[in-house]
Image: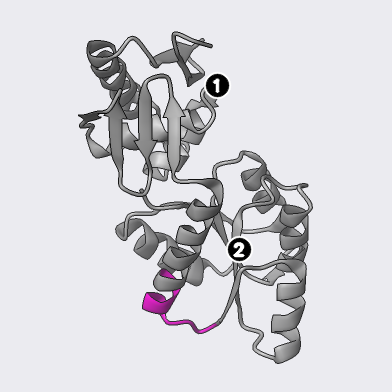
Amino acid sequence: MCAQLLIIEDDETVAEFLVDNLREDGHAVTIATSVTEAVAALRRGTAEIALIDVTLPDGSGLDVVRMIRGGEAGSPDVGVIMVSGRATDQDRVRAFERGVDDYMVKPFNYPELLLRTAALEARIRGRVGSVLTVGPLTIDLAARSITNDGALLHLPAKEFELLAALARDPRKVHMKEDLMERIWGYRNAGTRTLDSHASRLRRRLLTVSEGPWVINNWSVGYSLRTVIQ
């Protein structure tokens, strides 16, 4: 499961290039073109890695980094790669002092950006732990495997990603738009696809286990409920 990426970039050409190519390479991608949009997207809590330009129309990308690390804009554990046209040692040092994980200079090499993103994703997954347990299910994110009381359970790719997203915080009601953004990379494209996947996942889990159950909460989002709460 590739990381959920947030591209914070006001250059339309660069942003479109990154979105098109990163989605083609399997990432769910959201775009923000300003500090204000970036903070709003980060507070929705779906981004795992942010690619941030320094110069934005309403402020500096370094301010976004400061807010991330200070807990003012989503999780302070979001991975940050600064992608900037500024190439001096002073610029790099200032960025790392603010808390970026990596720094790339424009014009960048896309394959290198992809490798650096993958390396940061691996470090993040290692920090937060790659195994989730909910009810009798053990979900290994790195191996993309699920066991039900030790027996291997096979799920289609999107159902695996949906279950993993819900299992990260089972009691939370995960908004449908946020799940669409995390798993499919689109926020405002309707939720029929999500609803059909959730329905199939619910039936599949009920067939093999007494829990967890996929719960549709007032038609606004999904959560997991286990036998033992």
Image vertical order of residue 186 relative to residue 116, above or below:
above
What residue is rendered at 68% in x and 72% in y? 54
Residue type beneath disc 2: Val
Q: Which residue range is magenta in the image?
A: 106-114
x then y, percent, for residue 25:
31, 60
- Residue named by callout 1: 173
Q: Is residue 77 left or right of residue 135?
A: right
Q: Earlier in the sequence, mark 1 or mark 2?
A: 2
Residue type beneath disc 1: Val
- Residue named by callout 2: 80
In three-dimensional space, the C-alpha distance between marks 1 and 2, rounded to whole angstroms, equals 27 Å
Q: Is residue 51 left or right of residue 113?
A: right
x then y, percent, for residue 130:
44, 45
Which element is circle 2 on?
Answer: strand
x then y, percent, for residue 147:
29, 30
Which element is circle 1 on?
Answer: loop
What residue is rendered at 54% in x and 57% in y? 49
Task: Between residue 154 and residue 100, name the one nearer to us.
Answer: 154
Mark 2 burial class by Cα count in 10 Å: few <14, some 14-19, many 20+:
many
What residue is rendered at 71% in x and 90% in y? 89
Whether residue 156 can be seen here = yes
